[in-house]
Image (tube, rainbow, N blue to C red):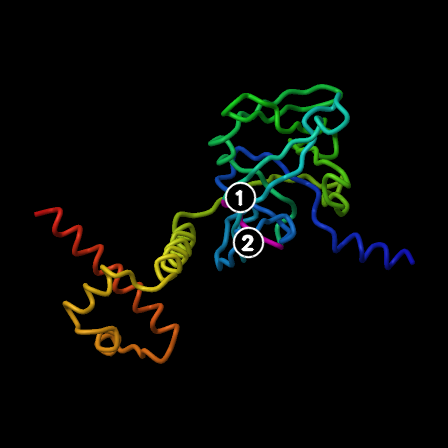
Amino acid sequence: MASLQRTHQANLPCPTWVWSNISNVHVAKDRSWFGDDYVSLNSAINSTTGTPIKVIGIGTVDLPTKTSPNRNGPRSHGTLRLKNVLHAPSIICNIIGSPVLNDYHVFTSFSETSSGSIHRLSDGRRIAYFKPATQAARFFQVRLSGPPVGPKVGPPPFDPSTKYLLRAEWPDSERKKHDNVQLLLQDKDIADGPLKATENAWVKKHYGDEFKFLQAHGLSILKEEDRAEGRIIVRTMISRDNEETSAI
């Protein structure tokens, strides 16, 4: 029975979200934290140990948070939105990096009930607060909302007898992989939908018809994926023509 309970807890998401101002990226350990915009990404981040940590995805995380240690009820909850969060299953805990400062103020302090708070830049509203620091873990850890507002979570990952230095660095070379993913998503948007009348007119003027256009680019009109790729090419070429015309 105890073994089954430990297995169940191990399958729950890591509860620890640590503010790290020396990290240049947000990192989440578990897939369940992410929203609908999650996409796969083959990348890596640097850690304090010197060993790269594998990244398998990226997306937005909406953290259900407690806004104050002194409040109860519906108004005591907030949502901390983190953008471009990397998914790294082997990292010890979740990290809130310096990009959070693009949308929020982070205040740190030390008291019996809190070690700081996070406020939204747009209106100054307090969105979250940090748990009081302990001897075992001197980190700024966000207090999450418990069930039913927040999810069930697993046990804390830290060993009280171990000292930790938490830092995640996403190198520029690896960040470019994300940029390439964004370009692919843009290509998908470009490919969606049939050619417009003006686009068909451009194809007719330069190639005769869609069949000849696709054939000229090594594509087949019988394959929908080829036709989608053809639409990307058409719209890219038209855009390039428009840019060249406006530059004259």
Q: Is residue 65 above or below residue 92?
A: above
Residue 77 percent location from the top left of the image? 69, 30
Q: Which residue is mark 2?
A: 53
Disc 2 on helix, strand or loop?
strand
Residue 38 percent location from the top left of the image? 54, 53
Q: Quadrant of the N terminus?
A: bottom right
Residue at image location 55% in from the left, 39% down from the top: 82
Assess whether residue 193 is covered by the magenta stretch: no
- Residue toward you, 145 or 246: 246
Which residue appears farthest toward the front when viewing the image? 197
Which SS does the magenta portion mostly show? strand
Q: Which residue is mark 1?
A: 168
- Tell whether label 1 touches label 2 (CB within 8 Å): yes
Residue stretch rendered in magenta on the structure: 84-89
Q: How many marks?
A: 2
Residue at image location 21% in from the left, 61% down from the top: 237
Instruction: Give whichever of discs 2 and 1 has the lower sequence position.
Output: 2
Q: Is residue 201 above or below residue 246?
A: below
